[in-house]
Amino acid sequence: MNAPSREFDVEAIRADFPILTRMLDPETPMIYLDGGATSQRPRQVIDAEVSYLLRDNAAVKRGAHRMAGLATDAYEGSRERVAEFLGAPSPDEVVFTKNATEALNLVAHSLGSGDSSTPEHLRVREGDEILVTEMEHHANLVPWQELARRTGATLRWIPVAEDFTLDLSDLVSLLTERTKVLAFTHQSNVLGTVNPVATLVEAAHAVGALTVLDAAQSAPHMPFDVASLGVDLVALSGHKMLGPTGIGMLWGRYDLLEQMPPFLTGGSMIELVEMERSTFAEPPARFEAGTPPISQAVGLAAACDYLDGLGMDQVAAHERALTQRALSGLAGIDGVRVIGPALSPERTGAVSFDLAGRHPHDVGQVLDSLGIEVRVGHHCAWPLHRRFGVHGTTRASFSVHTTTAEVDAFVEGVAHTVDFFGALA
Ligand code: PLP
């Protein structure tokens, strides 16, 4: 993380995002409150990607020509920049993937490869246990369910308490000497809850379990440093941190990556290939089979520059203020039930709510008619919604370019939606 290079001036920030001037129809400006699903990109990110495509585009690593060298430099330079943003001790600990989902699948498949040369602590087998939480996005649940199914391991989970935080009262019995992995989200994409990483990591490491952190929602919104978090592996998403779609990241401690078998196999990840067998390259190449997302990596590096330029402390403070404003506003509207904790340092700017049992698609449609773009449904966290007795919720999520006026328009929009549906009873 670098020192900020500019004032946190929302109007100046907004001028960097060309899409924010878009009208949804001749009368309706767009209010984008869905950065939790995918963020908008500043001009600096778009320009970096376009400039790479206009000047340096080629396949990386495989060519003797100068263009291949330029493309490889751009790609590997981006890895260095991303590693710096994440606080990774070495760029070789950063693996580029398609998205956070692929990063999590990579880990789950690698741990279940059944490769007998893999050390015991990196092999999940029958009788082992995998621990997740009840608040996981499906991306950090289904790959572990599948790993358990393939290997005969048992999946267990930490429940979510009434106050929307993890119920850690049974942690000691949930983490046993059979637990191989604890996989958990840093920040819930529905509740906004930020989980106690240090407590969870300490407890997992005490029984020798590997820790896997889903940081898709946290890294774009708060100071983030893998070295001080103490986790073993981290999955991240480019398109939620002002970067391009088509790129995610797996960060892993190098000594672990070095011992993990590959997920996808093919070109670019090998050391030696014969007709009968192959040996594999060292990380990160071992985990990057095929032609990688090169222009996306360049755009992602520019997104890291952009966020660092604003300062992640300022980003967090800005979004916290917006969250407070939204929560206070919603508290004054009858029929709104926020599915998430009150404002605290352990809460960030995903604000989900149920509106007197109204279908969230209906709520979203009324808000959309006002130009307010929010997310509706189960947000890929179906078990979590069941936990709170709702089929789905409506979620507003805030970003560096969100203004207080937009948050006020959102709150007024929700009040209008209540009126629109008539009596709440
Ligand atoms: N984890 C969380 C907490 C998310 O919110 C999401 C996406 O919404 C994902 C993982 C999946 O991210 P990606 O789209 O990069 O696969």
Image (tube, helix red, strand yellow):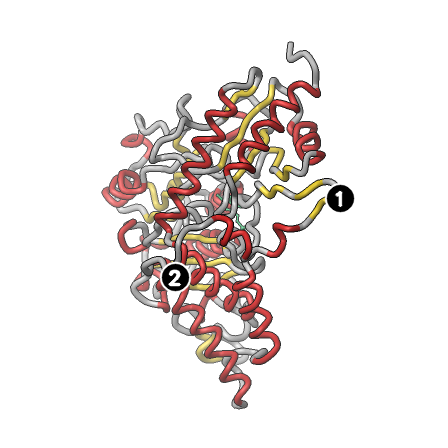
Which amino acid type corresponds to the residue marked 2 in the rendered image? Met
Tell me: residue 328, above or below residue 141: above
Tell me: residue 317, above or below residue 96: above
x, y (%) of residue 124? 40, 49
Q: Do the residues labelled 1 and 2 touch (CB within 8 Å)?
A: no
Q: In which quarter of the image is residue 285?
A: bottom left
Tell me: residue 51, above or below residue 189: below
Extreme top residue here?
Answer: 425
Query: For the point 40% across and 26% down, which residue is it?
Result: 342
Query: For the point 29% across and 43% down, which residue is it?
Result: 201
Instruction: Look at mark 2 in the image and give the residue it sits on.
Output: 260
x, y (%) of residue 129? 38, 40
x, y (%) of residue 79? 42, 68
Which of pointers 1 and 2 indicates the residue nearer the eye? 1
Instruction: Look at mark 1 in the image and give the residue it sits on.
Output: 25
Extreme bottom residue here?
Answer: 65
Which amino acid type corresponds to the residue marked 1 in the rendered image? Asp
Can you see residue 180?
yes
